[in-house]
Image: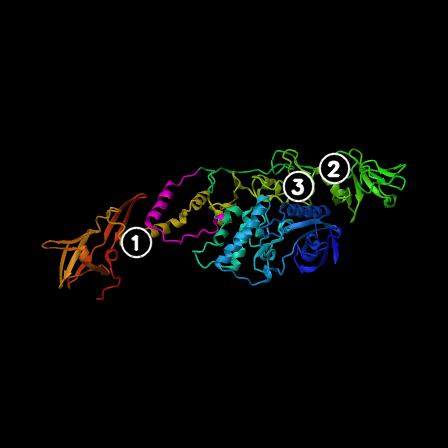
Amino acid sequence: MTPMADGRYLRGELKWADPVHPVFLAHEVATGAEKWAWCLAETATKGLGTDERRMLAHLVRRALLAVPPRLGIPWLGAEWVGFEGGQLWWVTDAIPGAVRLDETSVTLDTLERDRWAQRLLLIIEQWHAHGWIHGNVTPRAVFLDEDGRPWLGGMGVARNWLADRFDQDDPIDPTPEGHDRRRMHLPARDLYALASLLDQLHPPAGPDELSSWRSLDPAVRPATAMQARSAWALQSVPVSLPTWRHLDAIRVALQDLKFARRECPACGDVLEDPKPAKPRTCPVCLAGRWSAYQAREGMCPACQTGVLRHRTTSKRRPACPDCDRGLLMKTKTGWKCAWCHAQPDAGTLTERELFICEDCDQALAPAADKTWQLGPEGDAWTMREWAELAATGEMGLGNGMCPKCDARGHTENGYFTLLSPLTGSGYERGYSLRALRKDIVPWVAVGQTTANPGLVCRSGDVEFDTTPQGLKLVRAESNPIAEHLGQIHDLGTWHRIARDLPTAEEEDDLEELFNDALRLAYGQGELGLDGEANALCWSGRAVWVKDGERRSGMLRITPDRIQFRGWLRRHMGLVSQLKGMDFDGERLFMMWRESEADWEFEVTPIRWNLVLPSGRRKLELTASDLARRFSRHRHRKAD
């Protein structure tokens, strides 16, 4: 067993292997309670510079401290975070009898799936509320307790940064952001991952189940965990066939489609042609000039103004063991501290090395692992880390800043990471805590994710690359065209897609579908020859056929009556007495309820002239259309 945190915990054997965050068994010495000890694996940071490893460790530490454990929230938050042997460790509560989800074969019914969703969304909501993205909602980060309830542990802060830094995709990551390093990392990424996780455990049974599969669509998935929790119970509307009114409205929309030359198809804002920011320009405010910290070893981290002087105490002038700040003076009654006035026992005095501030008299005393501790109960860091704290006022904020907006970041080995702020509407939205190549940063700062010429929406949500074939969509977040990433069209076609209108190539199919919908509406009695007035069902030439005789005339049908006018005779019947109609080619058969004799006609097709909101339209109606309108039994009459 290895002691940790000055003997507070004892660390034991490995419990779960992980390339970035392995988990070890541990025990709290005072209570004997079982704990889990996590670490940032050294193997995961191979290939990084010394400062990069330090920055990444402090980045993970900031995330752990930002989202602490809370009562009622099933999150394995850290109760202690610190460095042991130069490696970052943190300790969480242990779940009795826990198993990791990726080692089980759990399946969920609909009710259990919804309970899991609500439970895990409580945790994700906490991360988003503090400005962080969990980034690792996968089976290897979910643990089941003895009752089968899910707990979320681990996080993707280091995993995602390393993937960006080494340009590696995570094969287990289900999100598009995990496979396309240019995509912005927004809170919706966690919701996508949760939806994918629940789909693995409970695949949707059909289109009536909204569940998680609908949340996978970038155009409709919620933007925050709070929205997801409130919308989870909604049910999708079954897809129905388009009606003639709907298709006619599409034709009207196509006729009215107008847009400005640089109008964004997704939101209507202006598409701009950005130029990359100038070198060393702050990517957050685009006004300040990025500069390196003046972090000099020897500056006091307490007052941030004084200079630390190295002193080696001796038995003639030892340091106070109580406050670790003042030097002891010899008095008649013994030793006395000039700072805290303590009178320690002479047997506790030893020679020590100290760094003492000339201005505030704070002292740094040597501690374990080549670190220096501020006071008896203070933190212990390396002198390089104390210098960073003296320069920035907070640990883990990199090696550079913008004096204009106070943004903080780290630059090393050709990569830049923005460490603060975490939220906003510019570069920090989706790219904070990301390791980006320095040559890409000036483009990302002005809204682009590639270094190719293109157009970017002024609102920052849509980006196109300009190609010889047209505009290629390379970024679209939560808007109507998000599902068309990678496609190339001209601007007019993008406006059609954004309004859910058919493209120019699809208009022929629309016209054919519209004809079928009109014919169906006629057959179902929704439309007549006079349109929606529906006062006339048929009017055209026909031949009466009976006992080998043929008589030409006009066949006229209204909703109430059927009338045939020949040269010599007229025939009339009530629609209410009609048993049904059938057809065979151009031959029409009318069957009556109280008559054994059917009426038979040879019907000439008529031209149906319609006046619709989208304009005039002509359609040919035949005996088959008329028979379907009045049919009761849809079988074909035998010859």
Q: Nearer the viewer, residue 89 or 200?
A: 89
Q: Nearer the viewer, residue 493 or 34?
A: 34
Quarter of the image where the N terminus is located = bottom right
**Mark 2 = which residue?**
302
Answer with the quarter of the image where residue 631 lies.
Answer: bottom left
Q: Amino acid at mark 1?
A: Leu
Q: Do tag 2 and tag 1 residues touch (Cβ < 8 Å)?
A: no
**Mark 1 = which residue?**
520
User: Is the residue 23 above or below the residue 344 in the image?
Assistant: below
Q: Count residues near mark 2 (Cα–Cα under 10 Å), then give few for <14, some for 14-19, many for 20+.
A: some
Disc 2 to disc 1, C-alpha distance: 82 Å
Badge 2 marks a residue whose secondary structure is loop
**Mark 3 = which residue?**
409
Identify the magenta region.
230-259
Identify the residue at horizontal 51%, vertical 60% (top origin): 108
Q: Quick check: is 175 in the magenta stretch? A: no
Q: Nearer the viewer, residue 321 or 172?
A: 321
x, y (%) of residue 251?
35, 45
Q: Which mark is residue 184?
A: none
